[in-house]
Amino acid sequence: MGVDAIFHPNTFLWWVGFDSTRSEPDPLPSLIVLVGGSTRIPKVQNMLREFFNGKELCRTINPDEAIAYGAAIQASILSGNIGDVKVGDMVLLYVTPLSLGVETMDAHVMSFVIPRNTTIPVKRTKNLVTLYDNQIAMSLNVFEGESLCTKDNNLLSKFELLGLPPAPKGVTSVDVTFEIDANGVLKVSAIEKTTGSTNSIIITNHSGRLHKEEIERMAKRSKRKRTAPAEQHGQWINID
Protein backbone atom coordinates (compact mmCIF):
# COMPACT_ATOMS: atom_id res chain seq x y z
CA MET A 1 0.00 0.00 0.00
CA GLY A 2 1.54 3.30 -1.10
CA VAL A 3 2.03 6.57 0.74
CA ASP A 4 -0.84 8.17 -1.18
CA ALA A 5 -3.19 5.48 0.13
CA ILE A 6 -2.15 6.14 3.73
CA PHE A 7 -2.66 9.87 3.27
CA HIS A 8 -5.99 9.63 1.49
CA PRO A 9 -7.73 12.84 2.71
CA ASN A 10 -10.95 11.28 3.98
CA THR A 11 -9.24 8.39 5.74
CA PHE A 12 -6.29 10.32 7.20
CA LEU A 13 -8.34 13.18 8.64
CA TRP A 14 -10.79 10.69 10.12
CA TRP A 15 -7.89 8.66 11.55
CA VAL A 16 -6.44 11.64 13.44
CA GLY A 17 -9.84 12.74 14.69
CA PHE A 18 -10.58 15.71 12.43
CA ASP A 19 -13.88 14.19 11.34
CA SER A 20 -15.45 15.26 14.65
CA THR A 21 -13.79 18.65 15.09
CA ARG A 22 -15.57 20.63 12.43
CA SER A 23 -18.57 20.31 10.18
CA GLU A 24 -18.96 22.21 6.92
CA PRO A 25 -21.22 25.04 8.21
CA ASP A 26 -18.84 25.87 11.09
CA PRO A 27 -16.88 29.12 10.77
CA LEU A 28 -13.18 28.87 9.97
CA PRO A 29 -10.79 29.30 12.93
CA SER A 30 -8.92 32.60 13.13
CA LEU A 31 -5.60 30.80 13.64
CA ILE A 32 -4.42 27.26 12.89
CA VAL A 33 -1.45 26.32 15.09
CA LEU A 34 0.57 23.21 14.25
CA VAL A 35 1.37 21.00 17.25
CA GLY A 36 3.84 18.11 17.21
CA GLY A 37 6.71 17.14 14.95
CA SER A 38 4.52 15.18 12.53
CA THR A 39 2.84 18.41 11.43
CA ARG A 40 6.10 19.33 9.66
CA ILE A 41 5.30 16.76 6.95
CA PRO A 42 4.43 18.77 3.79
CA LYS A 43 1.68 16.30 2.83
CA VAL A 44 0.00 16.75 6.21
CA GLN A 45 0.20 20.54 5.92
CA ASN A 46 -1.36 20.47 2.45
CA MET A 47 -4.23 18.32 3.70
CA LEU A 48 -4.85 20.65 6.63
CA ARG A 49 -4.99 23.66 4.31
CA GLU A 50 -7.50 21.85 2.10
CA PHE A 51 -9.57 20.83 5.13
CA PHE A 52 -9.78 24.46 6.24
CA ASN A 53 -10.67 25.72 2.76
CA GLY A 54 -7.20 26.98 1.84
CA LYS A 55 -6.54 28.97 5.02
CA GLU A 56 -2.82 29.43 5.69
CA LEU A 57 -1.27 27.70 8.69
CA CYS A 58 0.49 29.54 11.50
CA ARG A 59 4.26 29.05 11.20
CA THR A 60 5.47 31.48 13.87
CA ILE A 61 5.27 28.88 16.66
CA ASN A 62 7.62 25.90 16.78
CA PRO A 63 5.41 22.75 16.59
CA ASP A 64 7.64 21.06 19.17
CA GLU A 65 7.08 23.92 21.63
CA ALA A 66 3.40 24.67 21.00
CA ILE A 67 2.11 22.70 23.99
CA ALA A 68 4.55 24.47 26.30
CA TYR A 69 3.30 27.82 24.96
CA GLY A 70 -0.29 26.87 25.72
CA ALA A 71 0.55 25.57 29.19
CA ALA A 72 2.40 28.79 30.04
CA ILE A 73 -0.53 30.95 28.88
CA GLN A 74 -3.04 28.87 30.84
CA ALA A 75 -0.86 29.06 33.97
CA SER A 76 -0.75 32.85 33.62
CA ILE A 77 -4.53 33.06 33.27
CA LEU A 78 -5.17 30.82 36.28
CA SER A 79 -2.66 32.62 38.50
CA GLY A 80 -3.76 36.09 37.41
CA ASN A 81 -0.10 36.99 36.92
CA ILE A 82 -0.22 37.97 33.26
CA GLY A 83 2.28 40.84 33.48
CA ASP A 84 2.76 42.56 30.13
CA VAL A 85 1.49 39.57 28.17
CA LYS A 86 -1.93 40.21 26.64
CA VAL A 87 -3.68 36.96 27.46
CA GLY A 88 -6.68 38.33 29.31
CA ASP A 89 -9.05 37.66 26.42
CA MET A 90 -7.74 34.17 25.74
CA VAL A 91 -9.82 31.15 26.72
CA LEU A 92 -8.60 27.56 26.86
CA LEU A 93 -11.36 25.14 25.84
CA TYR A 94 -11.36 21.65 27.29
CA VAL A 95 -12.91 18.77 25.36
CA THR A 96 -13.97 15.23 26.14
CA PRO A 97 -11.10 12.87 25.17
CA LEU A 98 -13.44 9.92 24.58
CA SER A 99 -17.11 9.53 23.76
CA LEU A 100 -19.46 8.93 26.67
CA GLY A 101 -22.53 6.76 26.52
CA VAL A 102 -24.78 4.26 28.23
CA GLU A 103 -25.58 0.58 27.91
CA THR A 104 -29.05 -0.53 28.96
CA MET A 105 -29.79 -4.00 30.34
CA ASP A 106 -27.69 -6.70 28.64
CA ALA A 107 -27.68 -5.37 25.09
CA HIS A 108 -23.87 -4.85 25.11
CA VAL A 109 -24.39 -1.98 22.68
CA MET A 110 -23.08 1.52 23.33
CA SER A 111 -25.68 4.27 23.02
CA PHE A 112 -23.57 7.42 22.56
CA VAL A 113 -24.65 10.56 24.41
CA ILE A 114 -21.63 12.90 24.27
CA PRO A 115 -19.20 12.46 21.32
CA ARG A 116 -15.46 12.81 21.82
CA ASN A 117 -13.95 16.27 21.26
CA THR A 118 -17.11 17.93 22.63
CA THR A 119 -16.29 21.21 24.39
CA ILE A 120 -17.07 21.23 28.12
CA PRO A 121 -19.06 22.22 30.10
CA VAL A 122 -21.80 20.36 28.26
CA LYS A 123 -25.20 18.81 28.93
CA ARG A 124 -26.88 16.24 26.68
CA THR A 125 -30.01 14.11 27.11
CA LYS A 126 -30.93 10.82 25.43
CA ASN A 127 -34.31 9.13 25.55
CA LEU A 128 -34.40 5.38 26.19
CA VAL A 129 -37.35 3.00 26.26
CA THR A 130 -38.02 -0.26 28.06
CA LEU A 131 -36.96 -3.49 26.36
CA TYR A 132 -39.42 -5.87 28.02
CA ASP A 133 -43.12 -6.01 28.81
CA ASN A 134 -43.97 -4.83 32.34
CA GLN A 135 -40.39 -3.74 32.98
CA ILE A 136 -40.29 -1.88 36.33
CA ALA A 137 -36.54 -1.16 36.55
CA MET A 138 -33.77 -0.11 34.17
CA SER A 139 -30.08 -0.85 34.65
CA LEU A 140 -27.82 1.88 33.29
CA ASN A 141 -24.12 1.23 32.69
CA VAL A 142 -22.01 4.31 31.90
CA PHE A 143 -19.08 3.83 29.51
CA GLU A 144 -16.36 5.87 27.82
CA GLY A 145 -14.91 4.76 24.49
CA GLU A 146 -15.44 4.70 20.74
CA SER A 147 -16.60 1.14 20.10
CA LEU A 148 -20.23 0.23 19.44
CA CYS A 149 -19.61 -2.88 21.55
CA THR A 150 -19.41 -1.97 25.24
CA LYS A 151 -17.00 -4.80 26.07
CA ASP A 152 -14.34 -2.86 24.16
CA ASN A 153 -15.02 0.35 26.14
CA ASN A 154 -14.25 1.41 29.70
CA LEU A 155 -16.99 0.99 32.31
CA LEU A 156 -17.14 4.08 34.52
CA SER A 157 -20.07 3.26 36.77
CA LYS A 158 -23.54 1.74 36.89
CA PHE A 159 -26.84 2.46 38.60
CA GLU A 160 -30.52 1.50 38.46
CA LEU A 161 -33.72 3.42 37.98
CA LEU A 162 -36.55 1.77 39.93
CA GLY A 163 -40.28 2.33 40.05
CA LEU A 164 -41.08 2.32 36.34
CA PRO A 165 -44.79 1.90 35.56
CA PRO A 166 -45.63 -1.58 34.15
CA ALA A 167 -46.42 -1.30 30.44
CA PRO A 168 -45.74 -3.05 27.13
CA LYS A 169 -42.13 -2.83 25.98
CA GLY A 170 -41.20 0.41 24.24
CA VAL A 171 -43.98 2.39 25.92
CA THR A 172 -42.25 3.60 29.08
CA SER A 173 -39.45 6.05 28.32
CA VAL A 174 -36.58 7.33 30.44
CA ASP A 175 -34.57 10.52 29.91
CA VAL A 176 -30.87 9.95 30.62
CA THR A 177 -28.85 13.15 31.00
CA PHE A 178 -25.05 13.44 30.90
CA GLU A 179 -23.71 16.70 32.33
CA ILE A 180 -20.01 17.61 32.54
CA ASP A 181 -19.03 20.74 34.48
CA ALA A 182 -16.01 22.99 33.91
CA ASN A 183 -13.93 20.79 36.25
CA GLY A 184 -14.59 17.66 34.22
CA VAL A 185 -16.96 16.12 36.79
CA LEU A 186 -19.61 13.97 35.10
CA LYS A 187 -23.13 13.68 36.48
CA VAL A 188 -25.44 11.09 34.95
CA SER A 189 -29.11 11.23 35.87
CA ALA A 190 -32.20 9.32 34.77
CA ILE A 191 -35.87 10.22 35.16
CA GLU A 192 -39.20 8.65 34.25
CA LYS A 193 -41.50 11.64 34.00
CA THR A 194 -44.94 10.07 34.58
CA THR A 195 -43.97 8.70 38.01
CA GLY A 196 -41.18 11.13 38.81
CA SER A 197 -38.82 8.22 39.51
CA THR A 198 -35.24 9.46 39.34
CA ASN A 199 -31.68 8.45 40.22
CA SER A 200 -28.21 9.80 39.49
CA ILE A 201 -24.50 9.23 39.97
CA ILE A 202 -21.44 11.50 39.95
CA ILE A 203 -18.20 10.43 38.29
CA THR A 204 -15.00 12.39 38.87
CA ASN A 205 -11.78 12.29 36.86
CA HIS A 206 -10.36 9.88 39.43
CA SER A 207 -13.22 7.37 39.63
CA GLY A 208 -12.43 4.80 36.96
CA ARG A 209 -11.47 7.27 34.22
CA LEU A 210 -8.68 6.24 31.87
CA HIS A 211 -5.24 7.83 31.87
CA LYS A 212 -3.93 9.72 28.83
CA GLU A 213 -1.92 6.75 27.53
CA GLU A 214 -4.90 4.41 27.89
CA ILE A 215 -7.18 6.91 26.11
CA GLU A 216 -4.81 7.13 23.15
CA ARG A 217 -4.45 3.35 23.04
CA MET A 218 -8.24 2.83 23.11
CA ALA A 219 -8.85 5.40 20.37
CA LYS A 220 -6.25 3.80 18.09
CA ARG A 221 -7.58 0.31 18.75
CA SER A 222 -11.11 1.41 17.93
CA LYS A 223 -10.02 3.00 14.65
CA ARG A 224 -8.06 -0.09 13.64
CA LYS A 225 -11.18 -2.19 14.15
CA ARG A 226 -13.30 0.19 12.11
CA THR A 227 -11.00 0.27 9.08
CA ALA A 228 -9.29 -2.36 6.94
CA PRO A 229 -6.53 -1.90 4.35
CA ALA A 230 -7.42 -2.82 0.78
CA GLU A 231 -3.94 -3.25 -0.58
CA GLN A 232 -5.09 -4.51 -3.92
CA HIS A 233 -6.76 -1.16 -4.60
CA GLY A 234 -4.23 1.01 -2.77
CA GLN A 235 -6.88 2.53 -0.50
CA TRP A 236 -8.53 2.19 2.90
CA ILE A 237 -12.09 1.02 3.30
CA ASN A 238 -14.38 1.93 6.20
CA ILE A 239 -16.08 -1.30 7.22
CA ASP A 240 -18.59 0.19 9.66
Image (cartoon, rainbow, N blue to C red):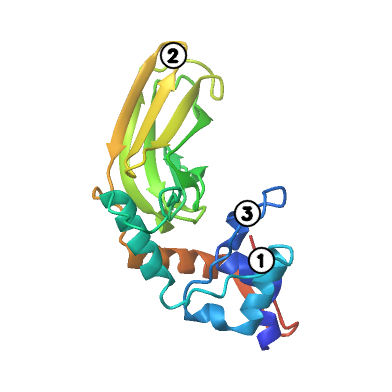
Left/right placement of residue 139 relative to residue 49 reads: left
**Disc 1 element:** strand
Splitting the image into 4 quarters, where does residue 75 fall?
Answer: bottom left
Question: Is 27 above or below relative to 212?
Answer: above
Label 3: which residue? 22
Question: Is 8 above or below relative to 96?
Answer: below
Label 1: which residue? 238
Percent across and percent down for residue 87 are: 41, 54
Left/right placement of residue 29 relative to residue 234 reads: left
Please tell me which of labels 1 and 3 falls first in the chain: 3
Give the number of the mark in front: 1 or 3.
3
Whether residue 155 is visible to the viewer of this picture, yes or no, is: yes
Given the current orientation, which residue lies at the most extreme bottom position?
Answer: 2
Label 2: which residue? 165
Kindly identify the amino acid type of the residue bearing the numbered disc 1: Asn
Cα distance in 3D space between marks 1 and 3: 20 Å
Percent across and percent down for residue 225 are: 54, 67
Q: Which residue is rendered at x = 61% and y = 65% of the image?
A: 14
Kindly identify the amino acid type of the residue bearing the numbered disc 3: Arg
Which is more toward the observer, 73 or 171? 73
Mark 2 neighbour density, 10 Å: few (under 14) some (14–19) many (20 or more): some
